[in-house]
C-alpha cells in the first residue's frame, strides 16, 4: 500500500527523536491520516508478509470480550505473549535473574507458554492482561454495575438508525485505565482508542483514532484488523464496505527498526489481495477463523524486528 509507505517516508524525513516508555527511543510525528478504499482490495501489506492468522484470531479474541491470552496461546498466536510474560517476571521478582531478551529470559518465556497451554489455573492468573480491548468493546462497566456491549450497540444502530453520528466504540475507559496501570506492569492502555462507523450511500466506513502507533510492527496489523472488522460489520448489516480511515496521534518508528524500514521502502507494492467472508454468518459474534479466505496474496518476504514492550 502506497499510503503506508508514504507514512514511513514522512516519518523518516520529518520525524523528531523522542524518548519513550520502553527506553528504546523513536523517531516520531504527531498527527497523520491515511484513507483506504476497501473496494480496492483488502489492505494487507504486500511489501512484507503479514501474519494474517494472528490478525484474525486477535480480532475474534476482542469480539469474545476476552482479556486472557489463553485463547491466543491455544491457537499458537504469539503477539501478546511478551506482555503477559513481563507481568509474570516483574510480579514474581525475577527481573534481576531474567534480563529482558537474555537467553535465560527466552528459555523462561518458552516454559511460561508451555505451562499456559497445559495448566488452566496458571493461565487464569498469569494470562490475564486486565481491562484491555475486549473488556471495553463488549463488557464496558457502568457505575450501576451493568455491562454495555458496544459492538452490539453499533450493529443495532447501523441496522436501525444508519444516519446516526453516534456509532462509536470507545476503548479509553479512564477509570479502568487507572486500574490497568496500577495492577499490570506491562500491558498498555489501549493504543487504538476509539473508532466510529458511518453509513453513506449504502456503504459502511470506519474511522479509527490511534493515540500511539508503532509504524513498522503494529500499524500493518491495525490496518488489516480494522479493515477486516469493517468488512465483517458491513457483511452482517447488509451493506457494502466503504473506507477505512486511520487517524493517528503519536506515530513513530522505533530506533531499532530503522534498517528494516529502509529495506521496506525500496520494495514496490503489489496488487492487494481479496478477503472472502462466509456468507452464512449473520452474527458479528458468530465468526470463526475458518469463515475467512484470503485470495491472491503475493507479498515480499517478512522482515523481522523486535517488539518494544
Image (tube, rainbow, N blue to C red):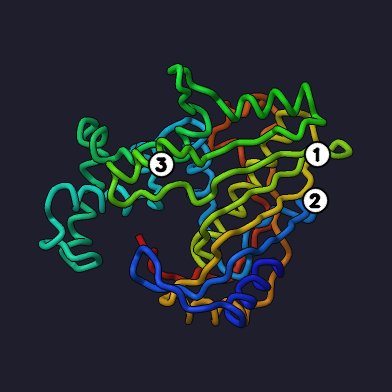
Q: Nearer the viewer, residue 51 or 260?
A: 260
In the rendered image, which residue does mark 1 sit on?
A: 240
The first of marks 2 and 3 along the sequence is: 2
Give the SS element for disc 2. Answer: helix
Residue 133, given in percent of the width and then of the height, sits at 47, 40
Quadrant holding the C terminus = bottom left
Note whether 155 is above or below 175 in the view shown. above
The first of marks 3 and 1 along the sequence is: 3
Note whether 79 is above or below 164 in the view shown. below
Q: Residue 124 falls in which quadrant of the image?
A: top left
The residue under the point 69% across, 33% down is: 167
Residue 188, given in percent of the width and then of the height, sits at 39, 50
The residue under the point 58% across, 59% down is: 249
Q: Nearer the viewer, residue 26 or 144?
A: 144
Note whether 211 is above or below 160 in the view shown. below
Q: Nearer the viewer, residue 202 or 108?
A: 202
* Left or right: 134 in relation to 8: left
Q: Which mark is residue 171?
A: none
Marks 3/1: CA distance?
35 Å
In the rendered image, which residue does mark 2 sit on?
A: 39
Residue 245, given in percent of the width and then of the height, sits at 71, 53
In this rendering, the count of numbered labels is: 3
The residue under the point 50% across, 63% down is: 214
In the rendered image, which residue does mark 3 sit on?
A: 177
Amino acid at each position: 500500500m502506497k499510503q503506508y509507505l508514504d507514512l514511513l517516508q514522512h516519518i523518516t524525513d520529518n520525524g523528531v527523536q523522542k524518548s519513550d516508555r520502553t527506553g528504546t527511543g523513536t523517531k516520531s510525528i504527531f498527527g497523520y491520516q491515511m484513507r483506504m478504499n476497501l473496494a480496492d482490495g483488502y489492505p494487507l501489506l504486500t511489501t512484507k508478509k503479514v501474519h494474517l492468522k494472528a490478525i484474525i484470531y486477535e480480532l475474534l479474541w476482542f469480539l469474545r470480550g476476552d482479556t486472557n491470552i489463553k485463547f491466543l496461546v491455544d491457537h499458537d498466536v504469539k503477539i501478546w505473549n511478551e506482555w503477559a510474560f513481563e507481568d509474570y517476571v516483574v510480579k514474581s521478582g525475577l527481573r534481576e535473574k531474567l534480563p529482558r531478551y537474555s537467553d535465560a529470559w527466552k528459555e523462561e518465556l518458552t516454559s511460561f507458554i508451555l505451562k499456559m497451554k497445559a495448566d488452566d489455573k496458571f493461565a487464569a492468573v498469569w494470562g490475564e492482561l486486565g481491562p484491555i480491548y475486549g473488556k471495553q468493546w463488549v463488557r464496558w462497566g457502568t457505575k450501576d454495575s451493568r455491562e454495555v456491549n458496544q459492538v452490539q450497540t453499533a450493529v443495532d444502530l447501523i441496522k436501525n438508525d444508519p444516519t446516526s453520528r453516534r456509532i462509536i466504540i470507545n476503548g479509553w475507559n479512564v477509570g479502568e485505565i487507572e486500574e490497568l496501570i496500577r495492577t499490570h506492569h506491562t500491558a498498555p492502555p489501549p493504543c487504538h482508542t476509539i473508532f466510529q462507523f458511518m453509513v453513506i450511500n449504502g456503504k459502511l466506513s470506519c474511522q479509527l483514532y490511534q493515540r500511539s502507533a508503532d509504524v513498522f510492527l503494529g500499524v500493518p496489523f491495525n490496518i488489516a484488523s480494522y479493515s477486516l472488522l469493517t468488512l465483517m460489520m458491513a457483511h452482517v448489516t447488509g451493506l457494502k464496505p466503504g473506507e477505512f480511515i486511520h487517524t493517528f496521534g503519536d506515530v513513530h518508528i522505533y530506533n531499532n527498526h530503522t534498517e528494516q524500514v529502509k529495506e521496506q521502502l525500496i520494495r514496490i507494492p503489489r496488487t492487494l489481495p481479496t478477503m472472502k467472508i462466509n456468507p452464512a454468518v449473520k452474527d458479528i459474534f458468530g465468526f470463526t477463523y475458518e469463515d475467512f479466505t484470503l485470495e491472491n496474496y503475493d507479498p515480499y518476504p517478512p522482515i523481522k524486528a523486535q517488539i518494544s514492550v
